[in-house]
Amino acid sequence: MNTMNESKTCELILALDIEERSVAIDLLKRAGDDLEWVKIGLQMFTKYGPEYVREISDLGKKIFLDLKLHDIPNTVAKAVESVSELPIHMLTLHACGGSEMMEWAVKAQKSNKPDLQLLGVTVLTSMDEAGLAAMGIEETVENRISRLAQLAQDSGMTGLVCSPHEVSLPKQQLGQSITLVTPGVRPVGADAGDQKRIMTPAKAADAGSDFIVVGRPIYQADDPAAIVASIRSELS
Ligand code: C5P
């Protein structure tokens, strides 16, 4: 099993974007014990809170808490301190919050929860060059991703969330030790949904992903355990 860069295997994370808690819990039971990782995002965390995180952890799952923190350094550090009380393994923050914010977050993580992996989000895939320009940022999306990825690493962050499109770049730029988590992944034959630039699990792993995030193809399946098994076989 891969625990943060100790090996080069790629692991599956289920994006648990399900509105109802009871439906989500039932789904996790049907997805089986081979599914180790679950991503809880803002939608569910703001609705059900820390108790929901504990409930899912009690089912034996490792948790990626995708809160994309972005605030002044002290507030983010305090938020990291607070979530350190939860049974979580990964947490996201926006790299555009700047080096001081990330450094404070890393310091809080190291002193409160050394095993917690902080992941930087560089440029949201919903953002394009026109969107950056409207904020006064005259830079290509690619350059900005590269700049923010470097800033994240220089600030002590050890992981990044990146789309399949850009997954091969960070390891070339920052080295193999950076942990990469990639959404936008679809098993062969699955519906892309609203994802535009998809990649199969095997290709994402080959390109350098350490973790892939898959939601709908699993939680909308009649037999989620079968899809989990099929994705995991693509990764091994
Ligand atoms: O259902 P699907 O597999 O598309 O879910 C992907 C998950 O990854 C969702 O939780 C989505 O918000 C997240 N995500 C993404 N693309 C990004 C960043 C996050 O799809 N660029």
Image: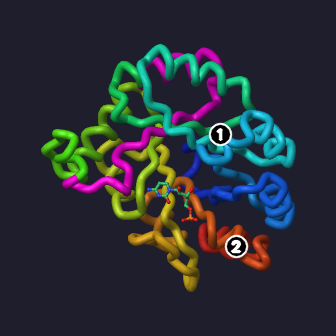
Rendered location of residue 229, percent (x, y): 73, 72
Q: Nearer the viewer, residue 114 or 84?
A: 84
Q: Nearer the viewer, residue 131 or 146?
A: 131
Q: Which callout, 1 or 2, points at the residue further toward the start of the chain?
A: 1
Q: Which quadrant of the structure image shows residue 54?
A: top right
Residue at the disc numbered 2: 220
Image quarter of the C terminus: bottom right
Residue 76 visible from this viewpoint: yes
Q: Is 144 situated left or right of 154 in this image?
A: left
Q: Which residues are magenta?
A: 102-130
Q: Which quadrant of the structure image shows residue 48?
A: top right
Label for residue 46?
1
Q: Is 139 situated left or right of 195 in this image?
A: left
Instruction: Determine the residue positioned at 72% across, 76% down.
Output: 221
Q: Nearer the viewer, residue 84 or 206?
A: 84
Q: Is residue 51 above or below residue 162?
A: above
Q: Is residue 210 a member of the stretch shown in magenta?
A: no
Q: Is residue 107 a member of the stretch shown in magenta?
A: yes
Q: Residues within 10 Å of mark 2 (few under 14, many from 20)?
A: few
Rendered location of residue 227, percent (x, y): 71, 75
Instruction: Determine the residue positioned at 43% across, 18% down.
Output: 73
